[in-house]
Each structure stands twice: as structure tokens, then as C-alpha cells.
Image (cartoon, coloured by chain):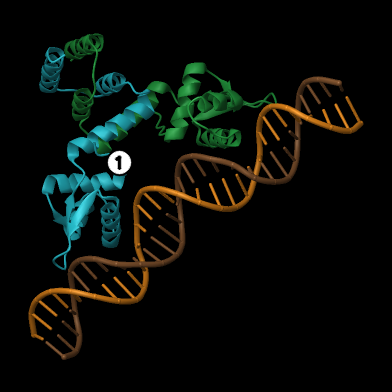
Chain colours: A cyan, B green, C brown, D orange
DNA sequence: TTGACATTACGAAGCTCTTCGTATATCTTT
DNA sequence: AAAGATATACGAAGAGCTTCGTAATGTCAA
């Protein structure tokens, strides 16, 4: 299993890459700037570092490099959740689930979806 | 609402304080050393910083200071979960819940508990 | 081809977190 | 009281992350 553990800023960029597909630094930076001010070279540097770490790869054929997510969305989120569960909930995912549910307003639809997932889990054991 | 956001190391210490109640640096350090090597002064410094931040307070009456958790367990975990949901799941707690459940093996008992919580949530809306 | 502009490369500063060495103070034991 | 053990205070180093300024390079239009 891959073991990607992006930082918060890196994760922000990965989200954009996951949604948009391969993207230029310019595009990523524009997206980021819809939420907060980030300098262009800041974003560039971050993506160069992510490239070194192997979180993304890039196509340097053209002048404008195109970055592609290497870290897979599901794998990455699993890693993040596992880490978070270990640090904040002593390894108990169920405690996290309970805390998250008790903490938030959930719509009836969401609760139905959740019950469906639980049924699935019950039947596959 | 309080807005405590402890770091990983600070959280480790808070867990011990929550479980054991008011404790000395020596005790905390001993507990930490059951899991990994930490120097005594490292733990001391960390707790002094936590004191400055207001995460803990301390009783300095005796030579050996006694530290007490100020950050409440439930509040702190809620803050952590909210933060994590925002960063990793675009603010959707339900996505986190689904990911955590799909990611882990859950016992039948845990699933029963979870269903009970869901029923409670459904009835209170 | 030359000037204007966009892009990349590089280095460094500032911040936070963690870690620990050393100095100082306090208690205990003999 | 002196020696030894235990505790606190303080400062600083090192690592990782984020940020940005500046320089170098590539591209395109006039």
C-alpha cells in the first residue's frame, strides 16, 4: 500500500488535481486564490516539492508544466483517517465515527446512506 | 466554545491527563516512555508550553508541580474532528464517517452501538 | 530579432514544533 | 551541613512547512 501523508497545503492542491485532473500551476494557483491569497511562486514551490516527494508527477514537455496527482484519493484519505484515529482516538475508528456523528447535523438521506453501508458491512462478515 | 487545537505531542499528554487526572511531569514522562523514548526535560518543556497556551494549568505549591488538563476531552475532540473534516473531507462529516467505516473492521457489537446512535439521531430531529 | 510577458528555478527567511543540554533551585539522607 | 538526587527554568538547535523575492529561461508578437 502506498503511504502518502500530505500536509494541509499539499492536500488542498491534491483535492484540486483529483477534481480537475492534470493541471498547470497557474490553474491550481487561481483555484487556491478563490479561497485565500497565495502567491504564484508559493504554489509553484509547493508543487515542485510535492513532485520531489512523489505525491505528483509532471509533464515538462511544454514550457508550462502539467502536474498530475500520483497519490490516489482513496488511499490518501485512508492513510489520513488511520493516522488521525491513532493520534486522536487511540486507534478506535468507531470512537471517531461516534464523535463525528454526534458532533454534526446529519440529513435523513445521509443517515439512510449510512444505514445502508452498515447493512452491507454486517452481511459481508 | 473553547477552541483548543493541541499538536500531536500535546494531545498525547492530554490523553494521559484525561485518564489519570492531575499529574506530575514525572508521571507523564513515565507514561510516555512506555511507548517511546522521551527525555524528561522534553516533557517538562512541552507541559510548560501547554501551560502558557492555556491547555493545562498547574499547581506550583509544592516543589513538584502538578498539572491539570484545562482542555475538555469532548470539546477538544470535536475541534479536532471539525478541523480534520474541513481539511480532508471538504467539510462533510458524513464522508469521513463512511471512509472510516469502510476502512476498518468493525465488530457486530460496535455496529449495534452505531445503529443505536443513528436511531437516537433520527428521533431527535 | 528584440521586447514584453509568462514560467520555472533557486535560495532563504520566518514560523512552529520538538528535542535536549545546562544551570539553578529544592528536598532528602546521612 | 554536605552530598546526592530530583525538579524547574531557560535557551538554543534542528527539522519541517510555508512563503516569497529574485534570477534565469522560454515564448510569442510586433
Q: Secondary structure at mark 1?
A: loop
* Neighbours of disc 1 within 10 Å: few (<14), some (14-19), many (20+): some
**Taking B48 as reference, is A73 left or right?**
left
Check the picture and name the quadrant holding the N terminus of chain A: top left
User: From what the image shows, is residue B106 above or below residue A61?
Assistant: above
Q: Residue furthest front?
A: A1
Residue B104 position by quadrant: top left
Return the x and y of residue D12 as percentages of the image width and height: 60, 52
Return the x and y of residue B97 as percentages of the image width and height: 22, 25
**Taking C24 as reference, is A70 left or right?**
left
Q: Nearer the viewer, residue B47 or A73?
A: A73
Q: Nearer the viewer, residue B55 or D6?
A: D6
Residue drawn at (14%, 20%) of the image:
A114
Residue drawn at (21%, 44%) of the image:
A71
**Taking C12 as reference, is A50 left or right?**
left
User: From what the image shows, is residue D27 above or below residue A94?
Assistant: below
Return the x and y of residue A15 as percentages of the image width and height: 19, 44
Residue where numbered disc 1 is placed: A5
Amino acid at each position: 500500500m502506498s503511504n502518502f501523508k500530505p500536509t494541509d497545503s499539499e492536500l488542498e492542491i491534491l483535492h484540486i488535481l483529483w477534481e480537475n485532473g492534470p493541471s498547470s500551476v497557474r490553474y491550481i494557483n487561481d483555484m487556491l486564490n478563490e479561497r485565500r491569497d497565495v502567491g504564484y511562486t508559493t504554489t509553484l514551490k509547493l508543487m515542485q516539492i510535492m513532485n520531489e516527494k512523489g505525491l505528483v508527477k509532471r509533464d515538462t514537455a511544454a514550457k508550462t508544466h502539467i502536474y498530475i496527482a500520483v497519490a490516489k484519493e482513496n488511499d490518501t484519505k485512508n492513510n489520513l483517517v488511520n493516522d488521525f484515529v491513532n493520534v486522536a482516538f487511540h486507534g478506535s475508528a468507531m470512537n471517531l465515527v461516534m464523535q463525528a456523528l454526534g458532533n454534526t447535523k446529519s440529513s435523513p438521506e445521509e443517515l439512510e446512506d449510512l444505514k445502508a453501508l452498515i447493512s452491507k458491512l454486517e452481511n459481508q462478515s
